[in-house]
Amino acid sequence: MSKKVIFELVDQLPTNNLTIRALKTLDRVIPGEWENTVGFDNTIRVVTGESDPALIQAIGERAVVLFNDKSQGYQNALWLYQKVDEADKALGTAILANKLSDKVPLMGWVSRLTPRAQKAQTIDLSIKLVVELVAFCQINGIPGDSIGDFVQSLSDYSGESLMRLTALICFDGLIPLGPHFLSSVTETLTNLPPKELTANPVFNRVQNLIPGQNPASKLAFMGESFEATQGWISDFTRDRALTPEKVADNLKTFIDFTEDKLDYLGALLDVSTNYYEHTGIQTLARRLIERAFAET
Amino acid sequence: MSLCLVALCVISGCGNPPPLDPPSPYALVQEESSQQSVQAVDQSAINGAQFNRFFPTTDGDYSRVYTQEKQGFAEAKLKQEDMDIAMLSISDTLSNPAARDKFTASKKTIAGFPAVNQGSTGTAILVRDRYQVKVLSRSETFTSENRESWLIKFDLDGLAKLQ
């Protein structure tokens, strides 16, 4: 897949693979919110409700022009979505290969992962949330560190963007870190030495776009972002009675795993799915097309 | 020798190569807009933040949520009881002059401004031959009449004075 030709990226979005099947298990969490819309012209038709070929062509052309202008931020957003999933694979692979193993695991759900693996997954979750914020601002405008605006916009999230947040909470929060994933993230971010951040592969790939002059200030921004959004995440999780068991049960419809392997399920999802990139490309396409039609 | 002949037959008998895909309808614009010097937004285009104050205000069960703000462009969602019913936008046609062409051929006006219906979901007006104000339906019940009534709710006189 070409990395930077927007209509090719959208044309080549898969209709059915492990990512799609994993996301579809979340239909029960956000029923009717996400359709796996693929294909560039098809996405234009779906987003706009138009069918006239000449108009579709004109909108598509304007969308291509907007995307190819690097100053407009769309390529940055795409890069962020892709880098997160690339780094995820490295993290998941390491966990599955037990490379992050340490001493004997502690008792309890949250501690089924070894402490080092748990910390890595926690940092991964908080960085993904920051990436969501940064990508949002690259695509839609608004100053890059306007957390307040972003938090407000979360309540209006729908479609593929809401699916991405839902997957983040379920696959990167509940499954690897358990029902208390929120407090786990808070505790980790509060106690994490900044220099440990630079050892994180996800952070290393996206750090240039995270506001802050150095790891300490970037860490502070991550903590601030997380604090601002955890109210929304907490309400979302509670209102839908989401638990690790519920998410895992849905996944059992197509992944065969046993209870004693549950702690590696998060890593398995990291390795074998790219939900962030997939739904990120769909979000990007939608926003481009909306702007392109408005400007045509 | 016979083994070579068999191999040759197998190789040549692998079938005809698959037909090449036709070029994408966007291949030309992709090539043209990939040049480093090409910019999608005119440097003189108005900052989108300056458009926000000309958007319609809402009350009752309507609400407006700003969704995009870039140089030369601002957009908001119009919601009714939490359902998306339309997209409202103002764009500076300095960045896309071809967008003005459709108004030249139109005899329609709205609030005294050149106007067009676009596709089956859009209605737009052109203010001071530069700013395109557009309403796009996002619900089947939001008709062209609804689009026109929301177009005139923009502060069009204020927008016309924007330099």
Image (cartoon, coloured by chain):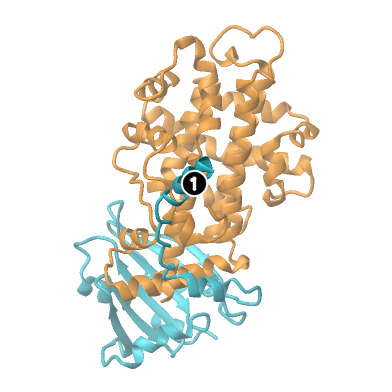
User: Percent x, y for residue A247?
Assistant: 41, 24
**Quarter of the image where one finds residue A17:** top left
Residue situated in front as seen by the camera: B71 or A283:
A283
User: Percent x, y for residue B55?
Assistant: 41, 71
Quadrant for the C terminus of chain A, please: bottom left
Residue situated in front as seen by the camera: A39 or B145:
A39
Asked if residue B124 is positioned above or below residue A23 in the image, the reply reads below
User: Percent x, y for residue A199?
Assistant: 76, 33
Residue type of the residue flagged with mark 1? Leu
Q: In the image, what residue occupies the spot 51% across and 32% down?
A: A272
Q: Colour of chain B?
A: cyan
Asked if residue B67 is positioned above or below residue A16 in the image, the reply reads below
Q: Is residue A51 left or right of residue A197?
A: left
Number of other residues with Cα within 10 Å of mark 1, as a class: few under 14, some 14 to 19, many 20 or more? few
Q: Colour of chain A?
A: orange
User: Percent x, y for residue B54?
Assistant: 44, 74
Q: In the image, what residue occupies the spot 46% across and 61% down?
A: A7
Q: In the image, what residue occupies the spot 49% across and 29% down?
A: A171
Residue bearing mark 1: B5
Asked if residue A146 is positioned above or below residue A100 in the image, the reply reads below
Whether residue B60 appears in this view of the structure is yes
- The outermost residue toward the front is B1
